[in-house]
Amino acid sequence: MWEDRRALDPLELGDADHVLDVGCGTGELTRVLAEESPGEVIGVDADADLLAVAADHAPVVAGDATRLPFPDGSFDLVVCQALLINLPDPAATVREFARVSRDRVAAVEPDNGAVTVDSSVAAESRLEGRARRAYIDGVPTDVSLGGTGTRRVFDEADLDSVETRRYDHERTVAPPYSESALSAAKRKASGEGLTDDRTTMLNGDLSAEEFDDLRAAWRAMGRDVIEQMQDENYRRAEVVPFFVTVGRV
């Protein structure tokens, strides 16, 4: 994701001797932080399996983002990526970040409601937009938090000098197709991806009949994707806007 790291400049990683990556998962951001910071970077997550992977990039600790296992003021920078969008009370979590930070708190959060898709299959962009709106309506947390929502959360947590910078992450599919691209096409053609999200989508305004109609159209779109892939004509570009927000304790 971080081929262009200029959006991380406000984190002032060059001046960070102790950095904590909360909800580090498999350590994708942890690796970048370790490469850019001269000091020690630690990852923390509640999932032991994910931590086993993240341990290849930095020291890791098992812990809950809402009750971090560190004393007050332990780090120069406490940061997370795509974590607050999954929490029911992100402001409380950011206050916990501020407790263990002696200087800066940062969050890298997407606006999943503003994702754009450009595809050589005419129906794909429209159907993905429809499915995304239904999913967002059914999710109990704010997965469209983005920059405005994160700034609001930082204000609620009493952080100062809040700054936000946008970073667009583009994911493309083009020949030669990767295994993950082929797998995604198969899931579209089978409707498996939508089926996995059915319960969430029905928690919103989508009816069961509307879901079945969407799934049928989705599977037809998936077959068109596979057909274009066979001729090596399929192209897809997805842009996910992320927002890097930094505040001072």
Image (tube, grey):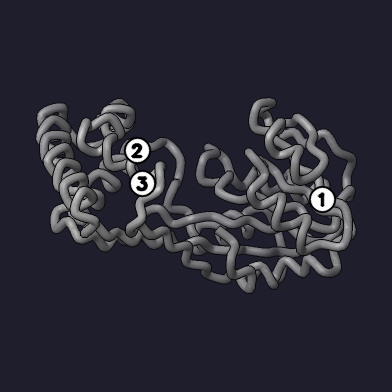
Query: How far separated are the C-alphas under marks 3 and 1?
Result: 32 Å
Q: Is residue 117 left or right of residue 130?
A: right
Between disc 1 and disc 2, whose residue precedes? Answer: 1
Badge 1: residue crowd in 10 Å (few <14, some 14–19, many ≥20): many
Q: Which amino acid type corresponds to the residue marked 2 in the rendered image?
A: Ser
User: The residue tagged with tag 1: helix, strand or loop?
Assistant: strand
Please state, as top left, top right, bottom left or bottom right, where the C terminus lies in the image.
Answer: bottom right
Q: Which amino acid type corresponds to the residue marked 3 in the rendered image?
A: Ala
Q: Is residue 66 left or right of residue 209?
A: right
Front position in the image: 141 or 170: 170
Q: Is residue 138 left or right of residue 96?
A: left
Front position in the image: 80 or 159: 80
- The reply to whether the C-beta atoms of the residues labelled 3 and 2 are less than 8 Å apart is yes
Residue name at image x 19 percent, y 42 percent: 222
Residue name at image x 65 percent, y 50 percent: 80
Which disc number belongs to residue 181? 3
Residue name at image x 14 percent, y 47 percent: 224
Q: Which amino acid type corresponds to the residue marked 1 in the rendered image?
A: Val
Picture quarter containing residue 71?
top right
Which disc number belongs to residue 41? 1
| Res. 244 visible in picture | yes
User: The residue tagged with tag 2: helix, strand or loop?
Assistant: helix
Query: How far separated are the C-alphas under marks 3 and 2?
Result: 5 Å
Q: Which residue is mark 2?
A: 183
